[in-house]
Amino acid sequence: MKNVRYEYWVDGPVIGIHDLHGEESVTVHAAGVLLEIENEIGSIEGKFVVWRDGDHIWDGLFFQDRHVNIYPLGCMTFEAAKEKLQNLSGRDREEYTFDGDSLTRAECSKNK
């Protein structure tokens, strides 16, 4: 992961990650980035994670069982992404699952 450059911070229940455009992106190595952060600050269970991609858009990351789910928030600022992510329900989001080298998209369950 030496080719991935990022900075992160913790703001209450939210972890912000800013991709600094290294040779490889945070998106491709999201699980490894989250593991590195967890090794530094302890468990990230129960935390919300937002990250700013190369297009300067903030989206959500959820980490479970070594898989990363990416939720498109489409926000221009950290504060807007933080608020939107904390207010999302399962019915409001599309799920992007990153597993190894593939990124797949599926609608979340509409069940309550």
Image (cartoon, rainbow, N blue to C red):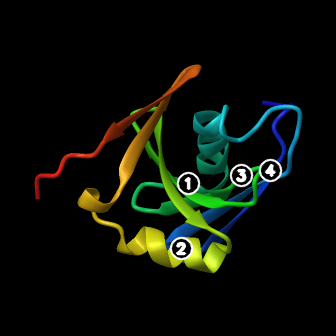
Q: Amino acid at mark 1?
A: Gly
Q: Say which amino acid is labelled 3.
A: Asp
Question: CA gap, disc 2 to disc 1?
Answer: 20 Å
Spot occupied by residue 48 in the image (x, y as percentages of width and height): 48, 63
The amino acid type, in three-letter code, at marker 4 is: Tyr
**Nearer the camera: disc 4 or disc 1:** 4
Decide which of tag 2 and tag 1 comes sooner along the chain.
Answer: 1
Place of residue 26 in the rendered image (x, y in percent of width and height, measured from the top left): 71, 41
Q: Nearer the viewer, mark 2 or mark 1?
A: 2
Task: Calculate the distance from the C-alpha at mark 4 to the C-alpha at mark 2.
Answer: 18 Å
> What residue is pinned by disc 2?
82
Disc on the earlier residue, 4 or 3: 4
Give the SS element for disc 4: strand
Please report contact status of discs 4 and 3: CB closer than 8 Å, yes or no: no
Amino acid at dot 2: Lys
Q: Residues within 10 Å of mark 1 (few under 14, many from 20)?
A: few
- The relative height of residue 6 versus residue 106 in the rendered view (above or below) is below
Q: In the image, which disc is placed on residue 53?
A: 3
- Looking at the rendered structure, the secondary structure element under dot 1 is loop
